[in-house]
Image: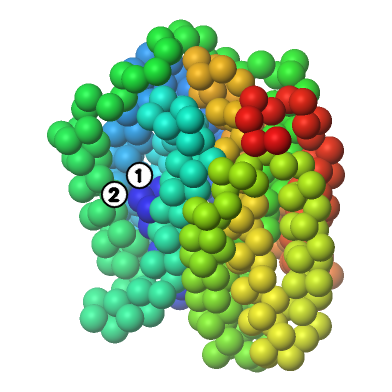
Amino acid sequence: MDLRFTLLAVPPVLTQIHHDLALDEKAVGALTSVPVLLLSVAAIGGSILIARLGARRATIVGLAIIAVAGALRGAGPNVAMLFAMTFIMGAGVAVCQPAAPTLVGEWFPARIGLATAVYVNGILVGEAIPADLVPVILPHIGNSWEINLALWSIPVILTAGVFGLWISDLGTRGEPRSVAWWPDWHKFLTWRLGILQAGISVLYFGLNAYIPDYFHTLHRAWLAPIAIGALNTAQVPGSVATLFFAQKLAGKPRFFFFILLVALPAVAMLIAGSDVLAVLGVTLLGISSAVGLTMIVALPPMLTHQGDVHRLSAGMFTIAYLGSFLLTLLGGALWDATHVPQTAFIPVGIGAVLVAFAGGTLPRDQFAQGS
């Protein structure tokens, strides 16, 4: 949950930040997607820490960075501090990202699908809670987006304490960790998994970046918090459902074609449908992105040996989040260039196609399990 609390505290107050700091649409898109870029750029740094410190200690370092930088984003407030601390906070999340599949492989080698579903369920609950609670909290803190951003660092630093004090004996299980940390860029599998996750990530981040301003521009401002809430809340039942079938479904290439079949009609409902259809479309996108993320994060421990999971994960995240950042930014650029709000969601459709292509064509014989 802590890998998303501070990130997703932004969309519910994005309109206030946009107004107070006079941001244009590209800057709005960058504010949401800069942490995603850092998940790419700093993923290799996470791999280094895992190789040197182990996955548990690397996670503690990452959580501490998230908490401190996340709390300081509203200091000032000014644009430079907001983006600088968002940058550093994203680096902290990036450190934790490759650690998670490594911990899954170390602690639950026989139940990778289920353990990944539990972990991703935590991520998605962490995305839903701020979307639902920020509107409730704001009136009690003087509608201050600065204080709101700081509050979400509290559970993050508490979790770092839990990792440090109560689970110190769990991070040493499994085969000895490899000291290698640099991703193998020559492996086509690294690139395929990166493209696959880039597609599923833009399904989510591309919507969070532009839905608030999209409905405000269309003079349907009341629908913005409903749509953001639906997108994030819908991920929870989608993720919970995977707890029951993830172990069997993980590693099934044909699954990824279903993402495309659901996502493209859902995008059409968002941009061309009535208010009810728009919310329904966003809900379907939330569910499909949640289930897809679970199946994708489960792949590295299934496709390589335990001592190499952090390297494959780091390579996958580097490619994935760079691609997601660029696609999300493309949405803002299309909107600015055409002055047509609907064009901001074109990259979401592109993401669905990438998921179907990269995931649906994975050779079945590459899987250590799940087929």
- Position of 273 with respect to 212 (left or right) is right
Which residue corresponds to mark 1? 66
Quadrant for the C terminus in the image: top right
Q: Earlier in the sequence, mark 2 or mark 1?
A: 1
Name the residue rendered at 75%, 49% in the picture.
Answer: 256
Residue marked by disc 2: 156
The x and y percentages for residue 151 are 26, 62
Can you say whether 119 is above or below 105 in the image?
Answer: below
Mark 2: secondary structure = helix
Mark 2 or 1, which is nearer the eye?
A: 2
* Residue toward you, 131 or 41: 131
Give the x, y percent position of residue 54: 36, 20
- Residue 181 is at least partly visible in this image: yes
**What's the residue at 67%, 67% (across, down)?**
285
Front one among 173 and 55: 173
Do residues under tags 2 and 1 come within 8 Å of each other at their CB atoms?
yes
Which quadrant holds residue 217? bottom right
At a point 22% along the width and 24% down the height, the residue shown is: 169
Above/below status of 200 relative to 25: above
- The amino acid marked with disc number 2 is Val
Q: Please tell me in which quadrant of the rendered image residue 100 appears.
A: top left
